[in-house]
Image (cartoon, rainbow, N blue to C red):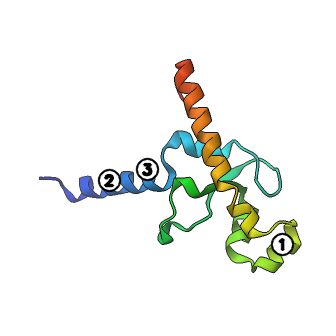
Amino acid sequence: MKTLKQRQREKQEFLFKKHFFSKHRVRFIKNLRCEVTGGFNCVNAHMKSRGAGGNYRDIVPLSWECHTDFDTMPMEKFQEKYGRTKDSVRRRRAYYQRLWKEEASRREEAGEAWK
């Protein structure tokens, strides 16, 4: 029989995999440029909230400031500040999922280990 700690750890691991896929994928997204500003030091920003069923396929790299503004600003104010609509940012999630798949496939073919 599993202990409470073991069950909690398993649940945390399950949720992490559902929402972020892997630590490698988190690092991959963090090393990309911000979708809105083009800056570095990105976070994994879910375009569909995790509470609403969002998962790792819904992630776009955003700087911390953009991510905060994306979540808190009204659409009009976000568009005024960044010159982009929130919907245009959301639509890019498929692009980043494709990018991830290509990178993972390339590394697998080359026999490279994730660092």
Lateral position of residue 102 relative to residue 51, left or right: right
Percent from the top left, x then y, of residue 67?
Answer: 70, 64
The residue carrying mark 2 is: 9
Which amino acid, mark 3? Answer: Lys
Q: Residue drawn at (74%, 77%), measured in percent from left and top?
A: 73
Most foreground residue, 76 or 88 = 88
Lateral position of residue 114 relative to residue 94, left or right: left
Percent from the top left, x then y, of residue 35?
Answer: 76, 54
Which amino acid, mark 1? Answer: Gln
Dot 2, how many residues are within 10 Å of its Cα: few (below 14), some (14-19), or many (20+)? few
**Is residue 79 positioned above or below 56 on the image?**
below
**Is residue 1 positioned above or below 69 on the image?**
above
Distance in Å between CA atoms under marks 3 and 1: 32 Å
Most foreground residue, 8 or 105 = 105
Dot 1, how many residues are within 10 Å of its Cα: few (below 14), some (14-19), or many (20+)? some
Q: Residue drawn at (48%, 44%), measured in percent from left and top?
A: 22
Distance in Å between CA atoms under marks 2 and 1: 40 Å
Q: Residue drawn at (71%, 56%), measured in percent from left and top?
A: 62
Q: Residue 17 carries which label?
A: 3
Q: Residue 79 carries which label?
A: 1
